[in-house]
Image (tube, helix red, strand yellow):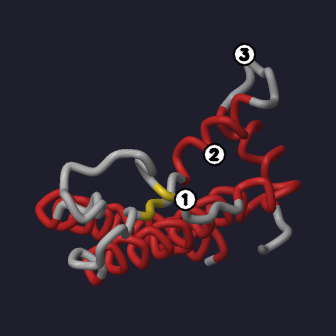
Amino acid sequence: MISSNAFNYINILDKAADASALRNQAITNNLANVDTPGYKRQDVDFESVLVREMGAYQAKYKTTSSKVKRLNGNLETLNVGSYTDAVGYSYRIDGNNVDVDTENVELAANTEKYNGLIDSMTSEFERLKLVMK
């Protein structure tokens, strides 16, 4: 974490990119275990954590920038881990609930999200470089 107000958005984007990379690992693990009897798919949900933490400030009329600035004071609240999705659900006899097509679509979408986050961080750094000239 970079402790300067100029990096508030970059810090949040960094946390989102980390979560996206973790989600990529979970999805590829799901695909690797598609034939493992009883395996339950894993997933990562950063978006819900971010929405919860941004809304936790009860600042209905505050700007997004002020919420991000306040959230930067404790970025550990944005740490996420994987969870088991639909534990009791399986449409297969062997108890596995991984669907290859769904996982491939999720992997493609998550890859696009990760690339977008990296592009956004690059743009933020470019803006900072422009200001420093």
Q: CA distance from mark 2 to mark 1?
A: 13 Å
Relative horizontal placement of residue 7, taking residue 38 as reference (left or right) = right
The residue that appears at 55% across and 53% down in the rendered structure is 46
Which secondary structure, mark 1? strand
Q: Real-space Cα distance between discs 3 and 2?
A: 20 Å
**Residue 45: % across, % down:** 51, 52
Residue at the (61%, 37%) spot, across then down: 51
Distance between mark 1 and mark 3 Cα atoms: 33 Å
The secondary element bearing badge 3 is classed as loop
Would you identify the image quadrant in which residue 11 lies? Answer: bottom right
The residue located at (69%, 29%) in the rendering is: 63
Residue position marked by numbered label 1 in the rendering: 83
Residue found farthest to the top: 61
| Residue pointed to by mark 2 | 49
Residue type for callout 1? Tyr
- Work out which quarter of the rendered image holds the N terminus and state it: bottom right
The 10 Å Cα crowd at callout 2, few under 14, some 14 to 19, many 20 or more, is: some
Given residues 119 and 55, the one toward you in this image is: 55
Other residues around mark 1 within 10 Å, as few (<14) / some (14–19) / many (≥20): some
Is 116 located above or below residue 125 in the figure?
A: above
Q: x, y (%) of residue 107? A: 26, 68
Q: Is residue 47 above or below residue 117?
A: above
- Residue 111, percent from left and from top: 29, 70
Q: Earlier in the sequence, mark 2 or mark 1?
A: 2
Residue 133 higher or lower than 70, as above or below: below
Q: Nearer the viewer, mark 3 or mark 2?
A: 2
Question: Secondary structure under badge 2?
Answer: helix
Residue of label 3:
61
Which amino acid lies under the numbered mark 3 shown in the image of this protein?
Answer: Tyr
* Residue occupying the far bottom of the picture: 32
